[in-house]
Amino acid sequence: MPADRSPTDPRPGDELIIDGQASVQFAAGRGFRFRVTAVDKRQTYRGWLWLGGYVLAPDGEARERREIFVQRAGLHFAPSLPRHR
C-alpha cells in the first residue's frame, strides 16, 4: 500500500479492491482484488477511468485478464498479502 499517494491515482503494479464503490456493475458480489497493468489516459466522464489488469485469486495469483471502467473515488488499495517463506 503506497503511503505517499492515493488509490484514486492508480499506477501499474497497484493492487486495488474493486467493489460496488468503484462501479455499480460490481455491487452484486463481495468485490475482488485487481492488479493494475495499465491506466488509460484518454478522457472519459469526469471522475471515471479505464483500468487494465488481472483479477487475483486469494493467494495473489492472476486468474483473469480484464479491462474495467471505474470511479476514481471508489478505489481502495488492497491490504498486503502475507508472504510465504
Image: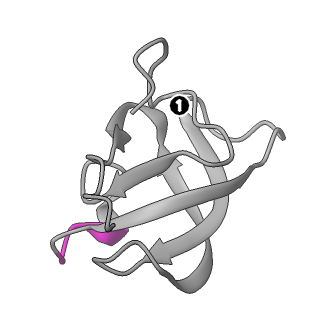
> Residue 72 magenta-drawn?
no
**Image: 62 above or below 53:** below
Quadrant where the C terminus sits is bottom left
Q: Tell me the kind of residue under disc 1.
A: Gly
Residue farthest front in this picture: 85
From this view, report whether residue 84 is shown above or below residue 41: below
Name the one closer to the observer, 59 or 49.
59
Instruction: Specify the segment rendered in magenta.
Output: 25-29
Residue 2 position by quadrant: top left
Task: Report the side of 41 relative to 12 (left or right).
Answer: right
Q: Which of 59 and 77 is in front in this view?
A: 59
For the residue pair 37 and 30, the one nearer the viewer reads as 37
User: How many residues crowd around disc 1 within 10 Å: few (fewer than 14), some, or many (20 or more)?
Assistant: few
Could you tell me which residue is drawn at 28 percent across and 77 percent down? 58
Q: Is 26 included in the stretch rendered in magenta?
A: yes
Q: Label 1: state its secondary structure.
A: loop
43 up-or-down from 63: above or below: above
Whole-percent x and y of residue 64?
Answer: 55, 87
Which colour assignment does the render follow? Answer: one colour
Image quarter of the N terminus: top left
Q: Mark 1 points at which residue?
A: 47
* Residue 67 image offset from top left, x and y in percent: 64, 70
On the image, the x and y values in percent for residue 36 come to 61, 55
* Residue under the image location 32 percent in, 48 percent down: 78
Task: Name the outermost residue toward the bottom.
Answer: 63
Assign the magenta stretch its main secondary structure: loop
Q: Which residue is drawn at 47% across and 11% down?
A: 4
Name the residue: 30% across, 48% down: 80
Residue extending furthest toward the right: 42
- Residue 65 is situated, as x and y percent measured from the top left of the image, at 63, 81
Task: Decide: is 18 above or below 5.
Answer: below
Q: How many numbered marks does the figure carry? A: 1
